[in-house]
Amino acid sequence: MLLNDRGDALVGKRIDMTSDAWQMPQGGIDDGEQPEQALWRELHEEVGTDKAVVIAQAREWLTYEFPPDLQPKLWRGRYRGQAQLWFLLRFQGTDADLDLDKHTDREFSEVQWVEPRHLPDLIVGFKRELYERVLAEFVDHLKLPVPR
């Protein structure tokens, strides 16, 4: 989760999706790579920058499962879901430092900064609970409205 100086989170619209779903940058861990190494590699590949500092790391891996009808279609049915270790970062650059074409396989058609409280509404439905758990993990660092 990459935050700008206003406390907004960066989300991207996946280039391979026909729906209007947005997501935060994320990615896999390569063999021999540590989670924080993967964080920097993926951030650079997906949004073209490493101008950030780590503020926090989730206390545990967060998981979600794909809906049963999607499981056979995603990654040729090899996975039922994902386990993710989330990091919270403060962006140290400007929007001009974001380069979606940095990697040969562009992942996002566009990016935008949004208030963290809106993140669960932007993601595909089956990841909504995951995003709520990410927000709960980092609530002490986020400017979120107090629940009533």
Image: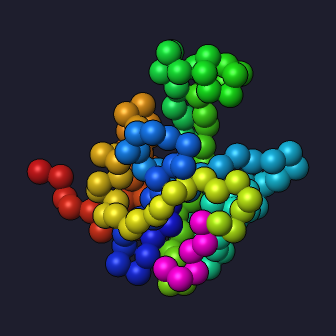
Residue nearest the viewer, comparing 111 with 30: 111
Report x, y in % for residue 24: 49, 55
97 is within the stretch colored magenta = yes
68 is within the stretch colored magenta = no
Q: Quadrant of residue 53?
A: bottom right
Report x, y in % for residue 139: 36, 59
Residue at (51, 75) in percent of width and height: 90
Q: Residue placed farthest to the right in the image?
A: 32
Q: Looking at the image, is 22 positioned above or below residue 88?
A: above
Taking the image as shown, residue 100 lies to the left or right of residue 34, namely left
Taking the image as shown, residue 34 lies to the left or right of residue 60, namely right
Q: Looking at the image, is 85 positioned above or below residue 63?
A: below
Report x, y in % for residue 137: 44, 52
Taking the image as shown, residue 68 lies to the left or right of residue 74, namely left
Q: Quadrant of residue 80?
A: top right
Residue at (74, 59) in percent of width and height: 104
Residue 92 visible (yes or no): no
Residue at (66, 74) in percent of width and height: 50
Q: Quadrant of residue 54?
A: bottom right
Q: Looking at the image, is 30 positioned above or below residue 69?
A: below
Residue nearest the viewer, comparing 48 with 43: 48
Report x, y in % for residue 67: 48, 21
Q: Please, which colouring scheme is shown? A: rainbow
Residue 124 visible (yes or no): yes
Please tell me how many numbered marks the rendered image carries. Answer: 0
Residue at (54, 35) in percent of width and height: 63
Which span is picked out in magenta?
A: 95-100
